[in-house]
Image (cartoon, rainbow, N blue to C red):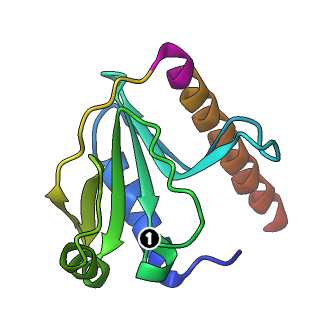
């Protein structure tokens, strides 16, 4: 599945934002559980920090994407729906139920929080699964990066 330009821009902005926070680390497309099994989920972006808080971000750029059958994986201590400004207006007008999920709006340059995320109590087992998913995603991305370096010769 090909990502839209807007989705890639939001991903890049999340990475840049994470890098600007001392002691904060993040990974794209984090799979929780075994991929291919019926019980796995995938978060668009997950970050954690030195206080051990894990934040999950789901990126949606259209209302149809938001309402699609694709699962929204809100598994972290705090969870966020990240959307462009236009979609945020639609969400607020439609009274879409966020259910404790924070709403972050991307204006093309920076993020603005429209609603706060409620803190969840995740178990140690869930925390371990999330951290394992982050590690796997980081390894996958490192392999992609180093494989491309070999192609430059």
Residue 153 horizontal side relative to residue 1, left or right: right
Query: Which corner quadrant holds the C terminus?
Result: bottom right
Label 1: how many Cα within 10 Å (few below 14, some 14–19, many 20+): many
Q: What stretch is highlighted in magenta?
A: 123-127
Judge by depth and name the residue closer to the eye, 116 or 91: 91
Please, what is the dominant secondary structure of the magenta stretch? helix
Judge by depth and name the residue closer to the eye, 4 or 150: 4
Total marks in image: 1
| Magenta stretch encompasses residue 62 | no
Indicate whether 75 appears above or below 85.
above
Indicate whether 37 appears above or below 90.
above
Q: Residue 6: image x %, image y %?
A: 45, 80
Q: Residue 26: image x %, image y %?
A: 46, 43
Element under disc 1? loop
Query: Which corner quadrant holds the N terminus?
Result: bottom right
Residue 4 horizontal side relative to residue 109, left or right: right
Indicate whether 77 appears above or below 89.
above
Q: Tell me which residue sits at (59%, 64%) in the image.
A: 70
Residue 83 horizontal side relative to residue 134, left or right: left
Q: Can residue 59 be seen in this view?
A: yes
Outermost residue on the top side: it is 124
């Amino acid at each position: 599945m090909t990502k839209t330009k807007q989705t890639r821009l939001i991903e890049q902005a999340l990475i840049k934002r994470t890098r600007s926070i001392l002691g904060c680390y993040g990974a794209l497309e984090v799979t929780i559980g075994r991929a291919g099994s019926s019980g796995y989920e995938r978060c668009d972006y997950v970050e954690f920090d030195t206080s051990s808080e894990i934040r999950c971000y789901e990126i949606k750029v259209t209302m149809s994407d938001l309402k699609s059958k694709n699962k929204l994986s809100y598994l972290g201590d705090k969870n966020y729906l990240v959307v462009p400004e236009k979609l945020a207006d639609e969400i607020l007008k439609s009274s879409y139920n966020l259910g404790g999920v924070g709403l972050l709006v991307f204006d093309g340059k920076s993020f603005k929080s429209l609603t706060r995320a409620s803190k969840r109590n995740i178990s140690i087992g869930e925390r371990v699964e999330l951290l394992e998913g982050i590690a796997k995603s980081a390894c996958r991305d490192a392999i992609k990066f180093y494989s491309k370096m070999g192609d430059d010769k």
